[in-house]
Amino acid sequence: MVRLAGVRKRYRGRGEVLAGIDLQIVPGVPVGLVGGNGAGKSTLLRIAAGCASPSAGRVDGRPAVVGYLPQSMPPPARMTVLAYLRHHAAMHGTGAGPAAATAVLDDLDFTGDRAGPLAALSTGNLQKVGLAQALGCAGAGGSQDPPLLVLDEPWTALDAGAAVALERRLAGWVAAGRPLLVADHTGRAGQLPGARTHRLADGVLVEQPAAPRGPEAWATVVLRCPGPAARTLAALPPVACSWDEDGLLGLRVAAAHGDALLAAALAMGCSVVSVGKAG
Amino acid sequence: MSGPLRRTGAAVGYLLALLVGEQRVLLPPVAFLAVLGVLFGGDPGPPPTPWAASALAIYPAAAWVALVVANVEDPVQRAVTVTAAGGRGIVATATVLVALAADLLMVAMAVLLPLVVGRYAYPPATVAMGAVAHLACASAGTAVGLLCARPLVRRVGWSFCLAATVVVVTAVQPWLPPVGAAVRALSSGGAIPVGPALVGLAAAGAAALLSWWVDTRR
């Protein structure tokens, strides 16, 4: 079990971002992290992953192998996708090579050129490579502690199919008895089986009541709207996540807010293509 | 154990692959080769005296290489690498190992080129002296480069100015152990400068250790 005890982080010029964090990441129980912009979620994740140090407090029980996905990483420009995954698999200490990582690419429906440079990838495909790199650490193994997975907004830039595939992947990760820490504002992490969600505000964590579970809690709405998607989204009530496909705008919204969303969309001149349970 | 040694090896492989993609790292050895060409292309005079000039030139070249190696990754990507490799110590070790490997390559260039051109006799003792003196200067350069790069100096522009200043100021002090002493041994026919080479290697190791220590406080 990974245990953060009294973790504080102070940056020069920014003051104390984390003001005493106590958090346990139990294998098999996904831990979700929510909080406003600049609340310190990414800092907390970096400390949990071990690539930043707390100013005070400690992190105990971190396994030897950690998979980490940062928020929007600038990739090494000239390295190819396969070389990148191969090197990261080797650093994770997987004897088996990048097979676990490339399986994640298959699963997430990666459409880029695997033999091409990372710099040529679209934002979504790059995110899939980052996820494959992080999830690929599962290939490292044997008798040691199960690897820890730390993901910073993993659903960013994923299309609808990949988002669902990632949810399944993470559910499988947790079901295999592995620890998982996710910062996520889309609400999907809270839907993982057994998830516990914490809100980070003013440098401290507050555990959130369990999110409404099950598919009835969420609705997927597909709209055809005049004008650019970004402008439509700005005018609509907040949604958990959105994607833009072939001129259609897909939205995922808490079922309780579905009627208000539809009313606003119709008022804007959008037409409703479909409404369904979130898959 | 997943083997810190194996993971260090993997980190070395990753850094080398990154550097091969970045042609920037080729500039210092190519510039150094040009200096060697000018030095030994004509009649440089009998060894080991001409090596004093190339030993002085390998110092900034090695510092430059170390800067490029240490700054090869953006900080966010570096966080991913550190996590994957299993700690900042492993990445810091891999960084100094790659920089020292580049040093060895440049030392080999400096020692072998005059032999190939071959105007004079190079007895083994003279060759050993040239190699050790170049190694002393190169490893000192690596130390300077590591001290002026991330994570100690975060801005690349500052890194370059600082390293250039340090190199210029220290290279002209004939009494200063690694570089000054090694160059003096070559120019005035002293003993094989083993001491300065050890000082240089220790300085490179200490620079890596300091980078790691400062990094763990971030």
Image (spheres, coloured by chain):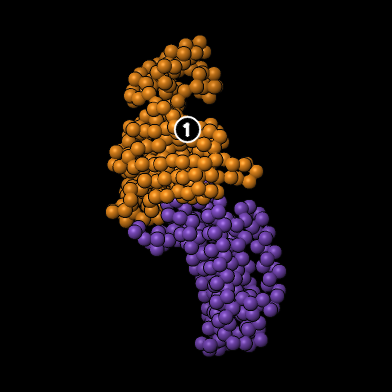
Q: Where is residue B100 in the image (x, y as percent from the top left)?
A: 52, 68
Image height of A218 relative to B120, above or below:
above
Could you classify mark 1 by the number of other residues whose Cα lies within 10 Å: few (under 14), some (14-19), or many (20 or more)? few
Q: Which residue is drawn at 38% across and 53% down?
A: A64
Q: Can residue A57 be seen in this view?
A: yes
Q: Which residue is drawn at 42% across and 21% down?
A: A254
Q: Where is residue A233 in the image (x, y as percent from the top left)?
A: 51, 22
**Would residue B185 appear left or right of A93 to someone viewing this image?**
right
Q: Residue at x 51, y 71 (%)?
A: B105
Tell me which chain appears purple: B
Q: Which of B147 and A233 is in front in this view?
A: B147
Q: Position of residue B129 (x, y in %)?
A: 56, 83
Image height of B91 relative to B175, above or below:
above
**Would residue A120 appear left or right of B29 to someone viewing this image?**
left
Which residue lies under the disc numbered 1?
A206
Asked which quadrant contains residue A168, the reply is: top left
Q: Quarter of the image containing the C terminus of chain A?
A: top left
Q: Which of B52 and B204 is in front in this view?
A: B204
**Disc 1 is attached to a residue of which chain?**
A
**Would residue B85 appear left or right of B113 to someone viewing this image?**
left
Three-letter residue code for mark 1:
Val
Q: What element carries label 1?
A: strand
Tell me which chain appears orange: A
